[in-house]
Image (cartoon, grey):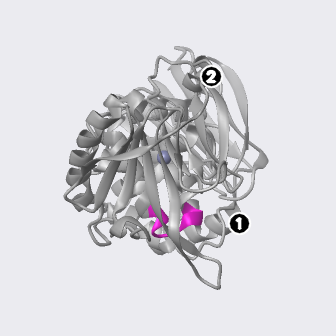
Amino acid sequence: MNARPAALRSSERPTRWQRCLVLFAGILVACAVALALRTPAALAQTCQARVGAEATVPVTVWYCAGDATGERDAGVAAQLFDRVWPEETRPEPDGLGSPIAPDTDDGRLNVYVTPPNDEVQLGRCPQSCYSVLGNAGVAVPVAPFVATTAGSERSSALMILNEQNGVNDATVIHEFFHVLEFAHSVHAALSWLGETSATWAENWYGASDTSRVGFFGEFQRRAGIALNRKNIVHEYGAYVWLVWLSQSTARASAVFRLWSALQPARSDSPDQIDPLIGRYLSRIGVGWRSSFRSFAVEDLNRNLGQATPELFRFGPFGDPAVPLGITPRWVRPPWTLSLGSRRTPVNLTHLAAQYDEVRAIGPRVRAVTVSSRRIRPWGDVVVLYRTRFGWRRRNLNDGSVTFCRARSDQNVSQLYIVSDNHDDLRAHSGASYTVTGRRSC
Ligand SMILES: [Zn+2]
């Protein structure tokens, strides 16, 4: 089951994310917000499904008998499906193509608009019964399951939308994207890329609900967590990596084709998913080793002109809803360089980065040196430096750079140092970089 949690506004504290649900075949799939905990433990109620609306596209929207809100919102949902279906099902490489039609209901996809605790029963409970709980929506794989002898699996799916959140375009786009993911690979849909891609779809298909930005804020607060692992909240905000991917290749098809590349996956475990992603990225020229640092720099989320040519919010592939200045967590508070040295260790889990800002440089400092140590072959150190000619960027792998402040083009006034681990599998440690201020060059 794949889910879209209720909107997380940036003002909300991450402690509100308190409960995880293990629902689908024992796989960790979703986390409910505190909503589920704040509500007195209401007993699950069986949804007596009634047809609320038939969309023009092959989608039937159901509500639970006696639920006036669900009955009303079924019509809203049907209209939204009519709008998003033609776009999301465009054939690859312009979309993810058609979903797999379910075995039942004349092949029409079923969508249920329910209160949080009402249970949609597809068979014996609890195995085949689903509630949306604190999520804005969930997508559940259903028959037919198309498995190969090699172990890959594709399926149809149903969706449940939470009427308490209000049925909106972001939730419909997101959950329907999960349905299209299941048509490619049930396993990949349950990996970190499932939520990451469905959240990216909210941006790509122009959802007017922009609560995804709240998840980006959470992603930035967790800069030390591996990009390519399932993690509550983090995997939703990681959609900006797909914004980066489409910007870097100037094609949204880079995201759609990734799903074709994931089809052979035999499970959702990293040893299946990671190599498929890695090979695909290398094939299109943006492998982790060469290009993860570009994402790490963009994730700084500051518009530094030439030094950050691709930013999440700009250009046809960017997300205009993302405000500048939501920076990743600093390795330490921004600081001022005076005479002397400061060494910063770089110990990072796979596909993670850390960020450092030298906000100002003391007047007695006439030379600034940044040197890195033991970062190769698994990581990168990138120095962004500001002179009166603007921001520039310097990759610094096991070397050093010195800025003589007597020279106008080297009179640096501010630095960002971005260091990363571009290995998609392993944590690494033992590297460092040192920033030194001297009296003379
Ligand atoms: Zn989801």
Corner quadrant of residue 22? top right
User: For numbered disc 1, what is the local secondary structure?
Assistant: helix
Residue name at image x 45 percent, y 68 percent: 183
Pick whichever, 163 or 223, lies toward us. Answer: 163
Q: Look at mark 1 in the image and give the residue it sits on.
A: 271
Marking on residue 324: none
Q: Is residue 183 magenta?
A: yes
| Range covered by the magenta-colored residues | 181-188
Q: Secondary structure at mark 2?
A: helix
Query: Mark 2 or mark 1, which has the lower sequence index?
Result: 2
The answer to whether residue 11 shows anywhere in this view is: yes
Vertical placement of residue 348 versus 379, above or below: above
Q: What amino acid does circle 1 point to?
A: Asp
Q: Which residue is mark 2?
A: 37
Residue 145 or residue 416, whichever sits in front = 145
Q: Position of residue 240 (x, y in %)?
A: 43, 45
Main secondary structure of the magenta stretch: helix
- Residue 122 at x, y percent in the picture: 54, 55
Q: Residues within 10 Å of mark 1 (few under 14, many from 20)?
A: few
Q: Cα distance, mark 2 to mark 1? A: 35 Å
Residue at image coords 57%, 73%: 153
Q: Quadrant of residue 177?
A: bottom left
The relative height of residue 86 versus residue 305 in the rendered view (above or below) is below
Q: Nearer the viewer, residue 50 or 127?
A: 50
